[in-house]
Image: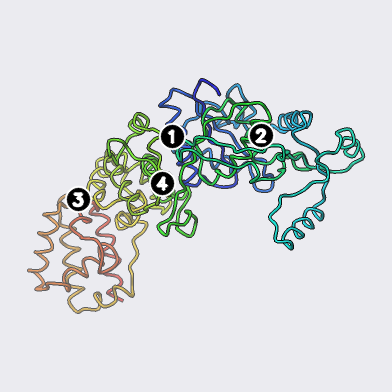
Amino acid sequence: MSEEIRVRFAPSPTGYLHVGGARTALYNFIFARQQKGKFILRVEDTDQARSTEEALKMQIEDLTWLGLKWDEGVDPVTLKDIGPHGPYRQSQRLPIYKKHAEELIQKGLAYYCFMTDAEIEAQKAQSQAEGSHAHLESPYQDMPLETALAKLAAGEKAVVRFKTKHLKKDYVFQDLVRGEIKFPSDMVGDFVLLRSDGMPVYNFCCVVDDGLMKISHVLRAEEHLPNTLRQLMIYEGLGWSAPEFGHISLVLGEDRQKLSKRHGATSCNEYKNQGYMPQALKNFVALCGWSSPEGKEIMSEEEMISQFGVDRLNPAGAIFDAVKFKWMNSVYLRALPDLEIWKGCEPFFKREAFEFPQNTEWQQKAIQVFKVKMETFQDAIELFRPLSQTSFVIHEEESKEALAWESSPVVLNAWKQMIEAHPSDFLTEAEFEQIQDAIKNQTGTKGKNLFMPIRVAVIGKPHGAELKILVPLMHKKMLLERANQVLAKVAK
């Protein structure tokens, strides 16, 4: 095993980064940083049917958004190799896998198997009929290599299988999360290393890559635990020392099933698009299966690095509590300077084509009003919607009753006149309340007959946010334009 701590995150580029994958990447990243080691990004893209360049870019974008910088692997911009152990994309390492498969064949530890799919299925069917769970018996396991090579030269297709029958022993290793694990060798039969088209299977290329890239520790999800037996056999066959393994718990939904799309958002990209912060996502997933020795919940990356230990990784499934995650995000969001919050909201305003004053003083004032109600940046959309001139719409059905009252035109005209007479561009909260009281006294109107028509004149509907919060953020010109639109509607 390498003396230097070297860990890797090895995603398959088939879609956006799942939060479970993000957690695996994070644990490897903070472990490497704590141990002054190296964090490597390797791309497992041998599944040609599902792996795409676009998905690779999406995953790299998600990892970059999270701030998980790798020391070796695929360059986040050019996608070229950075580091001394490349290529870091498995699809570019096929000659390496072929070389090591041939080495195992020459040692007599692997062989070419020419069984057809039909022959394999027939053998499986016979075993089932006999009530047997016997492993596949290949008639080619002891074929002389010269004979096999002649068949290949004649154009026949073959997979390369690893021999397991001579391995009559238990494979035991100390899992960093789960303690001692023992696998009897007869759990598996002769398994495939290379498919007939030359593509390696997961377990083989994983071992070859981890060995050649000098990976010292493998922290991965528990669903990979069954792969470990085959991988230990391959390490042994190649004469290499195995890394230390740690199999972390799965991330579960609140129904205790593996987190999937039926639970809602599951990818980093979805959470980014919903206005969550990367710092909050890192903090939250870190605590899905690990706990701070100081009992802290809100933690910076530096605190995670200093406090992390594999001894505190919990083997039990971790529940992804969406409510708690949103709360944690709100803590991070509200801790930002006001103008940073505004900056985080801007992509969501742009998405809705909102228009606001390009005035930092106004922006800061608006954020101070609304940030207490925000848990994500996306929450700003509905909170700020009434303040954008581009989004003002009179909700006719909702406002029909309020605008039909006999007193409404009188109230609306009084509102317009008092806004016109106001000496400054913006009202204070106190000035708004004084105007409302003045309209009440002047028109003799009170209660909903007073408030609802004014609310329609400000936000286009009789129910919604408190006007004393909104009106001070609205320019006098905007208030007059909206009042005129509503008065025109009443006059029809």
Find residue 228 and report its image quarter: top right
Q: Earlier in the sequence, mark 1 or mark 3?
A: 1
What residue is at 65 percent from the left and 48 percent from the top?
A: 50
Q: Choose mark 1 or mark 4, whichever is in front.
A: 1
Say which residue label 1 marks.
Answer: 67
Q: CA distance from mark 2 to mark 1?
A: 35 Å
Q: CA distance from mark 4 to mark 3?
A: 26 Å
Q: Choose mark 2 or mark 3, whichever is in front.
A: 2
Identify which residue, 277 or 101, lies in the foreground.
101
Q: CA distance from mark 1 to mark 4?
A: 20 Å
Q: Earlier in the sequence, mark 1 or mark 4?
A: 1
The three-letter amino acid code for the residue at tag 4 is Pro
The three-letter amino acid code for the residue at tag 3 is Phe
Count neighbours of disc 2 (C-alpha within 10 A) and say few if under 14, some if 14 to 19, many if 20 or more.
many
* Label 4 residue SS: helix
* Label 1 residue SS: loop
